[in-house]
Image: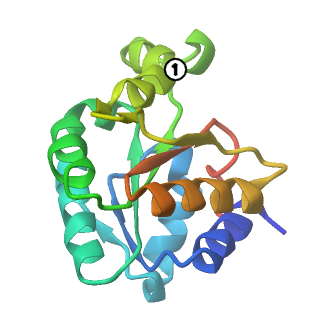
Amino acid sequence: MPKTTEFLAALKANGYDYFTGVPCSLLKGVIRRFDEEPEWGYISAVREDSAMGMAAGAAMGGRLPAVFMQNSGLGVCLNAIVSLNVIYEIPTLIVVSWRGKDGIDAPEHLVMGEIMTDYFDGITLGEMKGLPWQILSADSIEDDVATITKKITERRVPGALIVPKGILDASS
C-alpha cells in the first residue's frame, strides 16, 4: 500500500475526523489528497496557531483533530499549544515535518530541525513533563499513529507525529 494511503487509513482507523493545517512540501502527498478528496473535510489555515485554535474548537465539539505543519510553524504556535491545548487538556495530533533533520536543508530550517524533539520535551506544566512525540517510520505507519494517539488521548494533551523527508511527500 502506498505510504500516503496507508497513513490516511491509519488516521481514520484511530478516530481522527478533523483535519487542518498549513502545507509543507514534506507533507504534500497528504495535503494533495486532502485537496483532491473533499470527503476529508480538510480546512487550510493561514497560520499554524490558527490551525491549533480551529482544532481546539473541533475537539470541544467532540471531534479528534490532526493539525499539519512544517516544523518552523512550531515557533508560531507555541502559545496556542501551551495556553490552549495543554491548559484545557485538548488532545490534538500535530503532524509536523522534520525540516532540517541532521543539518540537511535550507539554512532557515536548521535550527528547528536540530531542536524539534527538545521543543516537545521542554513543554512542561506541573507534573506533566514534556509532550509526547513519535517519529513516523515508513515501516511502521499504523503502529506509529496508534502509539501517539494512545499517548495523547490517555494524557489529554497535544502530541506530535514527526515526519522525516520521503515518507509523505508523494500523493500515492
Rendered residue at 58%/53% (across/down)? 148
The N terminus appears in which quarter of the rendering? bottom right
Q: Residue 79: where, in percent of width, then height?
A: 16, 38
171 w.r.t. 72: above or below: below
- Hey, which quadrant is residue 109 in on the image? top left
* Residue, disc 1: 100
Q: Residue 65: where, in percent of width, then height?
A: 38, 69
Q: Is residue 136 visible?
A: yes
Q: Residue 168: where, in percent of width, then height?
A: 63, 52
- Out of 68 and 58, give the one closest to the viewer: 58
Rendered residue at 49%/75% (across/down)? 16
- Out of 103 and 122, give the one closest to the viewer: 122
Disc 1 marks a residue whose amino acid type is: Gly
Task: Classify 10 Å Cα crowding around label 1: few (below 14), some (14-19), many (20 and above).
Answer: many
Q: Secondary structure at mark 1?
A: loop
- Out of 105 and 19, give the one closest to the viewer: 19
